[in-house]
Amino acid sequence: MKSILLIGLGRFGRHIAIKLDELHHQVMAVDKEDTRVNAVLPFVTNAQIGDATNEDFLSSLGVENFDVCIVAIGDNFQNSLEVTSLLKELGARMVVSRAARDVHAKFLLRNGADEIVYPERQLADWVAIRYSADHIFDYIELDEEHAIFEISIPEEWIGKTIGQLDIRKKYNINIMALKTNDIMNLKISPDTQLLKDSTMFVLGETKHIQKCFHI
């Protein structure tokens, strides 16, 4: 369990608060609008109404005591930049800031952000890839070059084992798991047989996965 300071409670910040609650983390939520703060009260450990660009207010939260500080402000980049910078100056251990554009990310990283998230871009990438082909069921980008795809098993692979296909050597990808009727099988070996109506989770360089499965 981690202690997390969440600043900015718009739609993105609210969804983060709800998910962190599901994961049983301790969350201090902050926003200058009382309606937003009240909306997340059922999902957080504590909440404060206040302007996080105010150094005295931010300092009063004890930012150095949190494992992670998340700046989820999306409607005012100037405020996001100021809060990110102040957090680092006040001794925050880890600052994760939201960005909408590359130029925003550059300024945030130069002014204290340890990591950047692009919610709109990441969702757009997921939607574009997920719905660009009928045989793709999910997609997780790990970095610029690597990803995990949940994908249907090619018809010519059905009934064969992973060892027979020699997938890692031929295609430079790894099958991490199989899913059948919503049941995951993580015990993958060369003897594992690929069955009809199953999907597989493959890990590798995105270009290799795209080439192998004609994405």
Image (cartoon, rainbow, N blue to C red):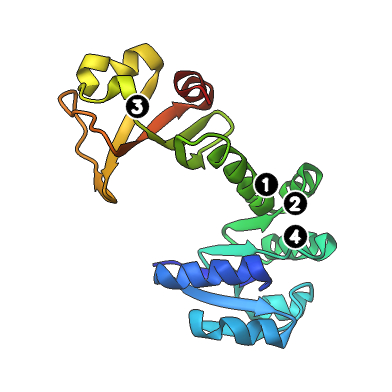
Quarter holding residue 98: bottom right
Amino acid under disc 3: Asn
Residue 65 seen: no
Residue at disc 3, secondary structure: strand
Which callout, 2 or 4, points at the residue further toward the start of the chain? 4
Q: CA distance from mark 3 to mark 2?
A: 32 Å
Which callout, 2 or 1, points at the residue further toward the start of the chain? 2
189 up-or-down from 93: above or below? above
In the image, residue 40 lies at what x, y percent? 57, 81
**Quick one: label 4, few (<14), some, or many (20+) residues within 10 Å?**
many
Residue at disc 2, secondary structure: loop
Q: Determine the residue positioned at 75% across, 60% down.
A: 85
83 up-or-down from 135: above or below? below
Quarter holding residue 81: bottom right
Amino acid under disc 1: Arg
Q: CA distance from mark 1 to mark 3?
A: 26 Å
Q: Which residue is mark 1?
A: 121
In the image, residue 44 lies at what x, y percent? 51, 79
Q: Which residue is mark 2?
A: 100
* Contact flag, marks 4 and 1 (Cβ < 8 Å): no
* Contact flag, marks 2 and 1 (Cβ < 8 Å): yes
Residue 53 seen: yes
Q: Which residue is mark 3?
A: 174
